[in-house]
Amino acid sequence: MKERLARLKAVRKLIKTYRIESQEILLGYLQKEGFIVTQATLSRDLKLLKVGKISDGHNGYVYSLPGDDEQQETERTYIHDFLRGYVSIEWSGNIVVIKTYSGHSDSVALAVDNLGFDDVLGTIAGRDNTVFVCLREGISGENFINCMKESIPELEA
């Protein structure tokens, strides 16, 4: 978890500091910073950080981070979707089951995916009212709930 957070922080810093035109260039900078990651991992990181490309004013495009206000608004939207849709959370080992109101499983799963919880391997939204969350080995449902409460203080689980 800490490695990913450190890597995301490094990606933000690199994009703010350098003129980065491609993932290959960004991967090179990350390697110089001591992070060895695959292109697929970097793609997920860029998506999580909502990184886009903007015109450099010449003949190319460079990576750009969203404004802090935009990022906070997006996070608030996911938190709102989660709180509006979930009914209860239970777990067994590293599997978490989130019961949702009818029709809310997709939005709750999307919120969990996009809030960037490092201990989540993935989610599966049921057809109607259940979300399954698979956690990394060694992470319990209780650890996950505590992490969620840090991001979503209004959460009652």
Image (spheres, rainbow, N blue to C red):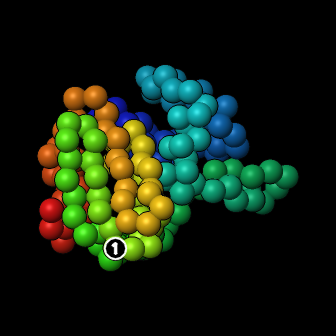
Q: Nearer the viewer, residue 25 or 139?
A: 139
Is residue 156 visible in this depiction of the protein?
A: yes
- In this view, the residue farthest toward the right is 59
**As drawn, is 146 to the left or to the right of 94?**
left
Which of the 4 image quadrants contains residue 88?
bottom left
Residue 20, percent from left and from top: 65, 43
Q: Amino acid at mark 1?
A: Tyr
Is residue 18 or residue 45 the one in the foreground? 45
Q: Is residue 65 above or below residue 143?
A: below
Q: Residue 128's x, y, as percent?
A: 44, 66
Q: Quadrant of the C terminus?
A: bottom left
At x 43% / y 23%, what residue is drawn? Answer: 34
Residue 17 seen: no
Name the image quarter holding residue 102. bottom left
Residue located at (70% from left, 59% from top): 54
For disc 1, the marked residue is 101
- The image shows residue 37 at horizontal and vertical percentages of 51, 26
Q: Residue at x 67, y 31 (%)?
A: 24
Q: Is residue 84 above or below residue 28?
A: below
Q: Quadrant of the N terminus?
A: top left
Other-residue count near label 1 (Cα within 10 Å), few / some / many at <14 / 14–19 / ≥20: some
Q: Is residue 157 above or below residue 47?
A: below
Q: Give residue 69's quadrant in the image.
A: bottom left
Q: Secondary structure at mark 1?
A: loop
Residue 45 picture location, percent across and down: 50, 43
Q: Nearer the viewer, residue 142 or 46?
A: 142
